[in-house]
Image: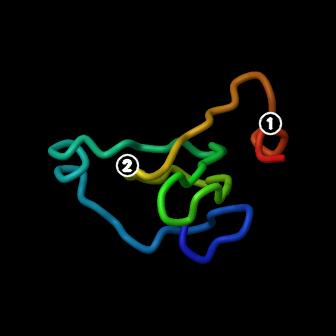
């Protein structure tokens, strides 16, 4: 989540599709609320594009309401 504010507009690291498949890296869809639960505990953000995750990020995918509502 780096230095992002409410919205994550870009990522600082990239992986190849082969690495994503081989290591089963979770893919976070656009407009997903993400929650950090290690190191920066409780930090929230909303993705603006498809991104990759790690074991320290929870994903909240709103289906019936907007991600900004979930964020607040």
Q: How many numbered discs sit on the rendered protein?
A: 2
Residue 20 in the image, given as x and y percentages of width and height: 25, 48
Between 39 and 62, the one lying in front of the other is 39
Residue 53 in the image, given as x and y percentages of width and height: 42, 51
Q: In this view, does 4 lie above or below 63?
A: below
The residue under label 1 is 66
Q: Which of marks 1 and 2 is nearer the N terminus?
A: 2
Q: Disc 1 vs disc 2: Cβ atoms closer than 8 Å?
A: no
Q: Which colour scheme is used?
A: rainbow
Q: How crowded is mark 2: few (under 14 residues within 10 Å), some or many (20 or more)?
A: few
Q: What element carries label 1?
A: loop
Between 13 and 55, the one lying in front of the other is 55
Q: Residues within 10 Å of mark 1 (few under 14, many from 20)?
A: few
Q: Residue at x 80, y 36 (%)?
A: 66
Disc marking residue 55:
2
Q: Which residue is drawn at 62% across and 33% down?
A: 61
Which quadrant of the figure contains the N terminus?
Answer: bottom right
- Asked whether, in this view, residue 59 is left or right of residue 70, the answer is left
């Amino acid at each position: 989540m780096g230095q992002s504010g409410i919205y994550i507009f870009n990522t600082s690291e990239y992986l190849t599709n082969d690495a994503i498949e081989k290591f089963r890296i979770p893919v976070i869809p656009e407009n997903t609320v993400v929650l950090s639960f290690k190191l920066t505990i409780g930090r929230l953000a909303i993705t603006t594009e498809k991104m990759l995750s790690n074991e320290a990020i929870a994903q909240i995918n709103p289906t019936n309401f907007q991600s900004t509502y979930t964020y607040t």
